[in-house]
């Protein structure tokens, strides 16, 4: 009864009530509460947990080759000696003894890697584990961001190489630069001043926390296959950084009092703690990604837990409306629409618009440019392509790597389906996409323009 009462109050005062006319602080507070509720449901639904556990398994396979690759890159810049110390700092919540032992073993594995001994097959396997980890991270982020379209192999390769090379280099260079600055004579003089010295000490204590937030922000900005604003990435990085620090304190307290587990599991206790620590870190990474997504898409927060369902009729209607807008810009010699531009035009969640764009690209009507951000432009001559052809292609569209079972032979049903298709085609048989783009009445007929003017609370 209590849970049912809480859900009733939540529905009445959080989701159903219109706060558009309330003061800014009220609307902001309600938005934060809605986001927290959505994050809790994302956690309870299990998707984030499954993704985090999958990443733990892949991390165990790719950790040593990943560190070996980072070590070789950092060695070229002369900062590789900090790798073990940084790894020990990351594993510090496991306990001083356990963290140092695990870090020492991992570094030992890295040092013992010999490419000549491994051979071509072994080296290919190790590289595959590294790429597999990055693919799983991208897949998890794309799932959080509701992104359907994956990167091409070339885009994926360049993005992964950038993350694997620039990321570690920036982190260790920042640590080295911070240590060098702190040891200068000018900094020693500033530290001798009472107030300035206290401020410098406070900033020195906050430096690792700032680096953690920067690392999370970097991942949220570059890994998802969509354009992520810096503000959204920073919001996710800030939340993930705070959660990571809180987890570090909590896990360190738990590990310090877990001597009974060592008595039961003996040497396996360190391995178990390490697995739990990896799982919690991946979970925090995904929670931060969800925060970044909700920060960039407040319309999803406004929708609540309701799922968008695009019926075939609505998909067809929205597709024709998008073609109308794209065609108008094309014949006006203006740049094509981006995904963000269409989202702002329709006031819809990006994954709903992207679903229709994937369909239009899949049937070959639109194509994606190589610009940054990506634009959608005509891929066929609009003058000779009819609306009827587009409607029939959308109705018959089937994504790649999917299977459609065959129906048993029913001549009456097949004939009825054919008559319906012919009737729909007869309505717009002579209307080309160029006519659609130049139709002044189309916006009013479709009705999307009027709907987009309704403000969201």
Image: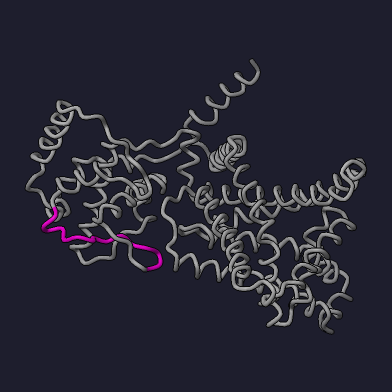
Residue 22 drawn in magenta: no
- Color style of the picture: one colour
Q: Quadrant of residue 84?
A: bottom right
Is residue 85 placed above or below 280 in the rendered structure? below
Q: Where is residue 43 in the image (x, y as percent from the top left)?
A: 62, 39
User: How many numbered marks are there?
Assistant: 0
Between 16 and 247, which is closer to the camera in this rendering? 247
Residue 59 placement (x, y as % from top left): 66, 56
What is the residue that sits farthest to the top in this orientation?
1
Q: Main secondary structure of the magenta part?
A: loop
Which residue is more in the foreground, 97 or 41?
Answer: 97
Side of 286 where 315 appears, left or right? left
Residue 251, position as x, y percentages in the image? 81, 47
| Residue nearest the observer in this picture, 224 or 350 | 224
Direction from residue 20 to residue 354 in the image, left or right: left
Quadrant (top left, top right, bottom left, bottom right) of the N terminus: top right
For the point 35% across and 42% down, the residue is: 403
User: Which residue is rendered at x = 54% and y = 55% of the image?
Assistant: 232
Picture quadrant where residue 385 is located: bottom left
Q: In this view, does 420 lie to the left or right of 339?
A: left
> Residue 375 lies in magenta, yes or no?
yes
Instruction: Identify the residue at horizontal 81%, vertical 70% (top origin).
Output: 200
Residue 73: % across, % down? 66, 77
Q: What stretch is highlighted in magenta?
A: 371-385
Q: In this view, does 250 lie above or below 158?
A: above
């Amino acid at each position: 009864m209590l849970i049912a009462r809480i859900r009733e109050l939540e529905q009445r005062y959080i989701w159903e009530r219109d706060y558009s006319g309330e003061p800014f602080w009220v609307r902001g507070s309600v938005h934060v509460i809605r986001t927290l509720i959505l994050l809790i449901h994302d956690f309870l639904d299990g998707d984030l947990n499954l993704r985090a556990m999958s990443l733990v398994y892949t991390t165990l396979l790719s950790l040593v080759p990943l560190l070996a690759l980072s070590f070789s890159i950092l060695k070229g810049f002369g900062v590789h000696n900090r790798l073990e110390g940084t790894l020990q700092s990351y594993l510090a919540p496991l306990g001083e003894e356990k963290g140092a032992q695990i870090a020492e073993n991992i570094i030992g594995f890295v040092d013992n890697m010999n490419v000549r001994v491994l051979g071509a097959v072994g080296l290919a396997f190790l590289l595959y584990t590294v790429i597999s980890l990055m693919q799983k991270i991208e897949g998890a982020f794309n799932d959080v961001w509701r992104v359907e379209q994956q990167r091409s192999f070339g885009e994926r390769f360049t993005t992964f190489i950038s993350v694997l090379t620039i990321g570690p280099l920036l982190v260790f260079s920042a640590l080295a630069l911070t240590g060098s600055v702190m040891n200068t004579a000018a900094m020693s003089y500033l530290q001798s001043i009472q107030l300035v010295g206290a401020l410098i000490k406070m900033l020195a204590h906050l430096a690792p926390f700032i680096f953690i937030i920067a690392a999370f922000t970097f991942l949220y900005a570059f890994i998802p296959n969509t354009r992520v604003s810096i503000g959204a990435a920073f919001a996710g990085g800030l939340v993930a950084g705070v959660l990571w620090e809180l987890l570090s304190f909590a896990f360190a307290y738990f590990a310090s009092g877990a001597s009974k587990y060592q008595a039961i599991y003996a040497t396996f206790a360190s391995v178990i703690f390490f697995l739990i620590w990896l799982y919690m870190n991946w979970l925090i990474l995904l929670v931060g990604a969800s925060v970044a997504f909700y920060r960039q898409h407040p319309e999803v927060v406004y929708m609540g837990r309701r799922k968008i369902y695009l019926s075939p009729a609505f998909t067809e209607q929205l597709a024709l409306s998008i073609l109308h807008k794209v065609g108008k810009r094309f014949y006006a010699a203006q740049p094509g629409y981006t995904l963000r531009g269409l989202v702002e035009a329709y006031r819809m969640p990006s994954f709903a618009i992207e679903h229709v764009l994937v369909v239009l690209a899949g049937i070959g009507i639109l194509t994606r440019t190589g610009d940054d951000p990506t634009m959608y432009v005509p891929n066929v001559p609009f003058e000779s392509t009819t609306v009827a052809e587009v409607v029939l292609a959308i109705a018959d569209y089937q994504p790649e790597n999917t299977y459609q079972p065959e129906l048993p032979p029913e001549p009456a049903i097949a004939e009825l389906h054919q008559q319906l298709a012919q009737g729909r085609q007869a309505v717009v048989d002579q209307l080309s996409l160029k006519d659609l783009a130049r139709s002044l009445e189309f916006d009013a007929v479709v009705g999307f323009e009027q709907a987009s003017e309704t403000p969201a609370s």
